[in-house]
Image (cartoon, rainbow, N blue to C red):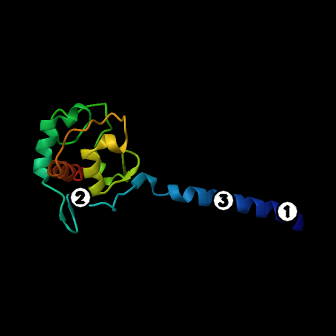
Amino acid sequence: PGADMPRVRGTLAGMLIAAMLLLPLAGCGKAGADLHPTASTPGGAIGSVDRGHDLIERIGCGSCHTIPGIVDAVGLVGPPLDNIGRRGYLAGLLHNTPENMVRWLRHPQQIVPGNAMPDMGLSEEDARDIAAYLYTLK
C-alpha cells in the first residue's frame, strides 16, 4: 500500500489542478444571464424601448446584424444580436452594462479601431434608446 501512495497523491494533485483551471469556465454558457439590467436600471430608465426599435429600423442596423423583432434585420456582417441582453461582454472586451452599451454604440471605432462597426454619429439619447431595445433581447 505504501508504494502506491506517491502515485495516488500525484493523481489527486493533477485532478485538483485541473478542477481549479476549469472552475472559471463553469458559468460560460450563461454569462451575465442574471447580472445585467434590462430596459431599466435601479437608477431609472436607460431609454425608450419603442423609440430604440424605430431607430434601429430607420438607421439600418439590420443591414449588418440579425436582430429579433426588426423587419428585414438579417445582416451577416456583424454578430447576431439575439440574447445581447444576456451576454457578458460587448465587442469581446467591455462588460455588458448600459453605460458600456451606450459607449459602444456611440464610439465603436474609439473602442476597437478598425472593427467593422462604423461610428454612426448617434446622440447620447439615441444610443440609450437603442440600448434599451437591445436589452429586451434575452
Where residue 50 appears, x then y in whole percent?
10, 50
- Give the camera-side residue of 63 and 71: 63
Element at label 2: loop
Looking at the rendered image, the disc whose residue lies closer to the viewer, 3 or 1, is 3
Q: Is residue 138 visible?
A: no
Residue type at the position of mark 3: Ile
User: Tag on residue 4?
Assistant: 1
Tell me what residue is drawn at x 40 percent, y 46 percent: 92
Residue 11 image offset from top left, x and y in percent = 74, 59
Q: Amino acid at mark 2?
A: Thr
Q: Which residue is mark 3?
A: 17
- The residue carrying pointer 1 sits among few (fewer than 14), some (14 to 19) or many (20 or more) residues within 10 Å by Cα, namely few
Query: Where is mark 2, residue-wise?
Result: 38
**Label located before the other in sequence (2 or 1):** 1
Q: Is residue 20 at least partly visible in the picture?
A: yes
- Along the line of sight, which residue is nearer the eye, 97 or 137? 97
Question: Which quadrant of the structure image shows residue 2?
Answer: bottom right
Dot placed on the residue nearer the N-terminal end, 3 or 1: 1
Which one is closest to the eye, mark 2 or mark 1? 2
Residue furthest right in the image: 3
Q: What residue sits 28% from the left and 44% below the top?
A: 107
Marks 3 and 1, how far apart in space?
20 Å
